[in-house]
Amino acid sequence: MSQNAPARPATVGGSGPDHPQSPAWSALADRAIERLRAHHQRLAARREAPACDDTFAPGAGAGRAARRATGPRPDATPTAPQAVLAQLSRSPARRHLPPEAWDAIVAQGGDPFATAEDGRCRPQIELPLGELLLALRLAATFTSPTDLARRLAPGALTVLTGLDWPDRALLEPVLEHAILPDAWGATSRAAKIDDSGPCLRVFTDTARDDVLREALGARTPLLFALASDTKLPAAFSGALDQHLTLAPITPELLLTLLAATHSATGRIDAAAVRAALPSAAALARLTPEHCLIAARAPNARAVAERLAGFAGAVAQTPAPAPVRDLETLAQRSPAHMTAWRIVRDLVAWREGTVSWTDLTRSLLLHGAPGTGKTMLARMMGESAGVRVISSSFAAWQSAGHLGHMLAAMRRTFQDARTAAPCILFIDEIDAAGSRDDTASQNRSYQTQVINGFLEEVDRIAREPGVILVGACNDPNRLDPAILRPGRFDVKIEVPRPDRAFLEGMLVDALRGTLTPAELAGLARDAVGQTPADVDAAIRAARADARHRGVPLDADLLRHHLGASTIPPASLRRIALHEAGHAIAAHHIDPGSIRRIQVSGRAGEVDRTPPRADMLLRDLEAEIMVLLAGRAAEDVILGAASNGAGGSAGSDLARASALAAAIEHRYGLGHDGLLWTEAPLPGLSAPPDLRARLRKRLDTAARQARTLIRQHQGAVEALAARLEDERELAGEDLHAFLRSTATDATSAPTEAQPRPRPPQIPENSLLE
């Protein structure tokens, strides 16, 4: 056998019957191992006969010049043994040792696949583990020589995040000696960029303005390799080719590493190692240090077993931040359960147990800002052990005019195809708008953007390996063609979390710091806030405690949640407002209320969607429900606040829009069958139309006040429960509403019409 192991034959991650398909980055990884081994072989030779100054140091321009002068590097392995190992690679299970020797190695707990005929089980040229691990993660990040070449084009500018300080210290030499093409260099110093060959300029921290201007003024390709929390200057926003995150440590990456470090043949018992390794999600929680410590074990399987032990210990350690385990969160909301099922199917497809055509391949997440849509997409990638390629319509549009915007869009989809299997996350999809929006002043531009997006979505749907995840605030603004099945198979709301979800977040972040009773109380105080709000409050409270030099306690966290400054009178008004909506909705449609929440900021009544076949009286009843919150304030507190108005989604805005739709959209108003596409009438509307809308709204408001007076006891009792508990849902809510029922609020049978709002003479509109 050879004196030096080859880079990596197809035995690991190859195409044999016992092994899954090779990752897309295999070619780049194989070349990185070969180049690192050749480099360290040269260093060893020069230590024996020092005559050259080619050191493994940043910006080794002299070394590059010497390599070009002396021609190609020698192969690390003689030709004949490489041919023997290549033959073994095509037959992964083939034994290259006599049966008795093979069985003896197995009996001693060794790996016969990795053992050479002379008894060695390690390569002659051993590579530094830190350098090799970083090289393989970079290979998995850049994915292919083609993708790498694009980032080395003149003028290219790329940001790479996720590197810790030790990795950034090794980055330049690893790029130069393992990743970049022959004769290329990597340096952080402009003085090193000379005629010695092409070079990649590397920044491992934000630089001074004058240094940035100098670098940007040249056509040298730039790479910003930054920590996750380091921010680039604002001027760089939207000007980057593709923002990359350093690839995580995955089972496939470790199999490749172990074949290079723990084998004299380039082969390992991949099946046994894979079985001993922890899951991709568990590996993602380990640090590079865990891997380097584990890699000191004598053989590949022992390394895997050590990693499994580390993963178990990490899993038992209290998390310092909100949980990122999608499997745990799947028990807390339908959206997380849907995402978890898609992840499980993706893992099954990678294992070959499910056909790609049987998978749900696309998901649209929608909901208010801060509810965790972006975090959920990232968690899907972490749980599946695949990369997440992220972009947004805003990022594409910042590329420039229409041609540049479409080119940026196509590049994102191509990056996803190259990185497959992966999650492709597109944020702010509602920025695309709809081709049905005739009021748009940029309709031609919008049409071309939507057509280009649909073309890319259809193309990626025909190719296996990419799960498309979109996110938006309002799916009603999207073009119907985007929403159809086949483009987005599943559409699910990511709502504001309920009290149980918030308590789970707090437990995950603060277990062992606060008592269960304190955590339950904080969850009550956090009702109405988004996961982003709670996450920010936890970080702010920790920082506050750290700077004060005091332990984190419930009062400090309550302060940062904003719960300690809620005026009781404001909370009571909000609770009465939402109770008014709930009692009115229950009167009109019993059983339609799913959840009620109140906080010091606002409240929310979650109802089942209304029927599509609504009659005029149903529409009028809906307006009454929308105005019942304001009516409850007026009747019980003596005056209404501004809480029913304000934004386009407020009670008054929705009630006014519904009244206007009755008049000129639904054919149910004064003008009969007339339909117009005009927006909601404003102060410039004809006086007679404004008068009709005012009449409808005032009539509904009087009906709402009458209903609140009839059920004032129920409204006040429900408000008191909400003040105390902040949330009512499920059977607790339904039982309470049933207990307040009267003959007027009993549920209608199929033979009975839906109860009408209290009737008020139309000749008495104002009180």
Image (cartoon, grey):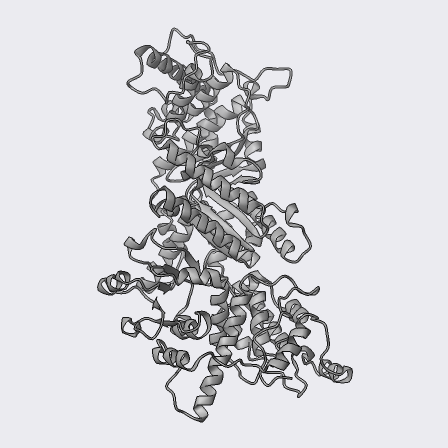
Q: Which residue lies furthest to the right in this view?
A: 100
Could you tell me residue 615's position as x and y percent?
52, 16
Determine the image quadrant of residue 659: top left
Q: Which residue lies furthest to the bottom in this view?
A: 49
Looking at this view, is 412 or 618 the one in front? 412
Looking at this view, is 592 or 723 the one in front? 592
Looking at this view, is 379 or 257 the one in front? 257
Above or below for 101 versus 59: below
Could you tell me residue 640's position as x and y percent?
34, 26
Q: Residue at x 50, y 69 (%)?
A: 136
Q: Residue furthest left?
A: 210
- Asked whether residue 495 appears in the rendered view, the answer is no
Looking at this view, is 523 or 490 the one in front? 490
On screen, residue 207 versus residue 701, left or right, reads: left
Above or below for 753 versus 348: above
Which quarter shows the N terminus? bottom right
Which quarter shows the C terminus? top left
Q: Residue at x 44, y 70 (%)?
A: 181
